[in-house]
Image (tube, rainbow, N blue to C red):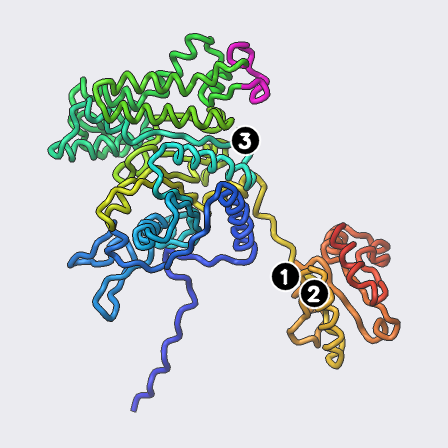
């Protein structure tokens, strides 16, 4: 008779597309989110925590179907046969809250939130199915002053967490301007939906393909380096010229401005960033630029866009809104050195209804192949006036921004503002099992003084293992009190950080002197630890 097989042991592994976060990663995120929260609250935003689970109907973007009801989200049916799902962003839950509690909330309602979101998508390098977002939104404000405020707050937030001015730029565009460009190009109407989709996807690839590549996709199509052919939108040359006037707006304005100040490359970069003061870049030689010529960048872009959409009412509205945003920001001291009008921002084309914005970090890092590249985008958002309407049937204006928490943390590490291991707790070692209360009393005194501390809770038989544990914990100090020290009313403080440094290069005489270890009166324990930590 065959023996019954023992039950299979579960594999100790993280599910595909997910990851675990340990000590320093968690505390870094917590500290960064605290700084972000302080900025948001200074702007009058209130915290909001919503359920991680929403009805699929409320989420709205991914609806159940016969073949795969949870496509794009992690969904399931409850006991009432209602489809539920983990939230895939923070905006859809806000829309539900704004509709559900509209009679209780102030209007406009300002809220910020942060937490994990989940997407049932194919994972890849750096792409996970669970990640953190940090959002701030204003619901119920139709004025573009709300959009300008979000942009200003985003700039303040980046600086508050440690991104230097000059290492970031907040770029602003308007969905209405793009709609106007489509209208002028003859691409409006339901019968042009397929062509619009190809055009929008082509514009979104500007950074990767350049203007020449985008132009090819607007026409018959484009063959890439591998020989694969991507079918284009099939636009006429005249239609493509209109779209390319939008795509190449930055280049056109740059050329116009440079014709007035010369071709110095430094001045070209200065104009692109729009910085207006000599202190921003003392290497600029042209006095006109130093005196503020760079500040006309926004005006030049707006004039260019106005010419493109002169035949479109919706396009003109978009340009006017951008002009208002620039003026409101300038009145608060946010010039084009921090926040700039930039037509290349085309994020969320099917989602937003007005101004859109994106925060880009401009300093260089090395990619996985050792090549220098700009860090890139860490936040984005815009106006979405139709989302709450799904619940109420009435248009409710809203605008907001979402920060990629993991991306921003990676940027701070790249700048040296995060990533250093946090010091572990002071460890009180155990030399005598019968004196556990004495050791716990030491821990209690240290904690009362605000010092992170713990008593060794493993088997104290091997003292060397206790010090190995302290090293593994990253402990700065080990506290030792054997029988002799207890009889003398003293304790020994071992500076583990300094001791490790000495051990690397110490001579025999230096090691015998034990400069990293001191004996102090038991009554002075807390004060002595505080002094050692301060060093």
For residue 115, which numbered disc appears in the image? none
For image coordinates 76% across by 78% down, the residue present is: 435
Picture coordinates of residue 407, whole percent (x, y):
45, 44
- Which residue position is annotated with label 3? 165
Pair 2/3: label in front: 3
Q: In this view, does 322 lie above or below 524?
A: above
Farthest-out residue, left: 191
Q: What stretch is highlighted in magenta?
A: 277-290
Residue density around tag 2, few if under 14, some if 14–19, many if 20 or more, within 10 Å: many
Mark 2–mark 1 Cα distance, whole angstroms, equals 9 Å
- Which residue position is annotated with label 1? 473
For the residue labelled by badge 2, is the local secondary structure a helix, a strand or a loop?
strand
**On the rendered structure, is 325 left or right of 450?**
left
Picture coordinates of residue 255, whole percent (x, y):
38, 13
Q: In this view, does 499 lie above or below 469?
A: above
Disc 2 or 3, which lies upstream in sequence?
3
Do the numbered discs 2 and 1 sit on residues whose CB atoms are within 8 Å?
A: yes
For image coordinates 69% across by 75% down, the residue present is: 460
Residue 286: say if magenta: yes
Mark 2–mark 3 Cα distance, whole angstroms, equals 41 Å
Which residue is more in the foreground, 158 or 22? 158
Picture coordinates of residue 282, whole percent (x, y):
59, 18
For image coordinates 38% across by 12% down, the residue present is: 256
Can residue 186 be seen here?
A: yes
Pair 3/1: label in front: 3
Quarter of image, res 416: top right
- Which residue position is annotated with label 2? 427
């Amino acid at each position: 008779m065959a023996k019954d097989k023992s039950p299979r042991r579960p594999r100790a592994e993280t599910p595909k597309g997910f990851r675990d976060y340990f000590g320093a990663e968690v505390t870094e995120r917590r500290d960064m989110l605290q700084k972000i929260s302080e900025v948001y609250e200074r702007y009058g935003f209130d915290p909001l925590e919503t359920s991680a689970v929403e009805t699929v109907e409320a989420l709205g973007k991914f609806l159940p179907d016969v073949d795969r009801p949870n496509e794009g989200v992690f969904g399931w049916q409850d006991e009432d046969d209602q489809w539920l799902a983990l939230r895939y962003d923070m905006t859809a839950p806000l829309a539900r809250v704004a509709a559900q509690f509209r009679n209780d909330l102030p209007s406009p309602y300002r809220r910020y939130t942060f937490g994990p979101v989940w997407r049932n998508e194919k994972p890849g390098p750096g792409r996970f199915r669970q990640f953190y977002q940090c959002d701030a939104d204003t619901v119920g404000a139709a004025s573009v002053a709300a959009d300008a405020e979000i942009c200003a707050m985003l700039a303040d937030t980046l600086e508050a967490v440690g991104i230097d001015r000059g290492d970031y730029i907040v770029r602003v565009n308007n969905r209405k301007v793009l709609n106007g460009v489509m209208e002028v190009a003859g691409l409006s109407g339901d019968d042009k939906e397929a062509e619009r989709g190809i055009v929008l996807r082509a514009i979104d690839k500007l950074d990767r393909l350049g203007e020449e590549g985008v132009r090819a996709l607007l026409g018959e199509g484009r063959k890439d380096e591998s020989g694969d052919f991507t079918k284009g939108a099939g636009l006429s040359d005249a239609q493509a010229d209109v779209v390319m006037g939008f795509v190449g707006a930055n280049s056109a304005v740059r050329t116009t401005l440079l014709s007035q100040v010369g071709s110095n490359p430094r001045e070209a970069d200065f104009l692109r960033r729009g910085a207006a003061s000599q202190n921003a870049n003392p290497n600029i030689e042209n006095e006109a630029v130093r005196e503020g010529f760079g500040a006309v960048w926004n005006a030049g872009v707006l004039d260019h866009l106005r010419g493109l959409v002169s035949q479109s009412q919706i396009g003109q509205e978009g340009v006017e809104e951008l002009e208002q945003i620039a003026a409101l920001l300038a009145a608060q001291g946010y010039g084009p050195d921090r926040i700039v009008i930039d037509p290349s921002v085309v994020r969320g084309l099917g989602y937003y209804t007005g101004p859109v914005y994106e925060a880009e970090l401009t300093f260089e890092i090395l990619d996985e192949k050792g090549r220098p590249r700009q860090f890139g985008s860490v936040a984005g958002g815009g106006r979405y006036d139709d989302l709450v309407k799904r619940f109420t049937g009435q248009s409710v204006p809203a605008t907001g921004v979402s920060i990629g928490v993991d991306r921003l943390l990676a940027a701070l590490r790249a700048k040296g503002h995060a990533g250093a291991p946090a010091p572990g707790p002071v460890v009180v070692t155990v030399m005598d099992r019968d004196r556990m209360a004495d050791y716990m009393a030491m821990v209690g005194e240290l904690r009362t003084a605000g010092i992170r501390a713990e008593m060794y809770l493993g088997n104290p038989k091997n003292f060397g293992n206790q010090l190995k544990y302290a090293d593994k914990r990253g402990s700065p100090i080990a506290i030792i009190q054997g029988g002799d020290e207890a009889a003398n009313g003293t304790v020994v403080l071992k500076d583990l950080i300094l001791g490790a440094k000495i051990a690397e290069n110490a001579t025999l005489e230096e090691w015998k002197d034990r400069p990293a270890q001191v004996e102090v009166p038991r009554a002075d324990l807390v004060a002595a630890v505080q002094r050692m930590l301060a060093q």
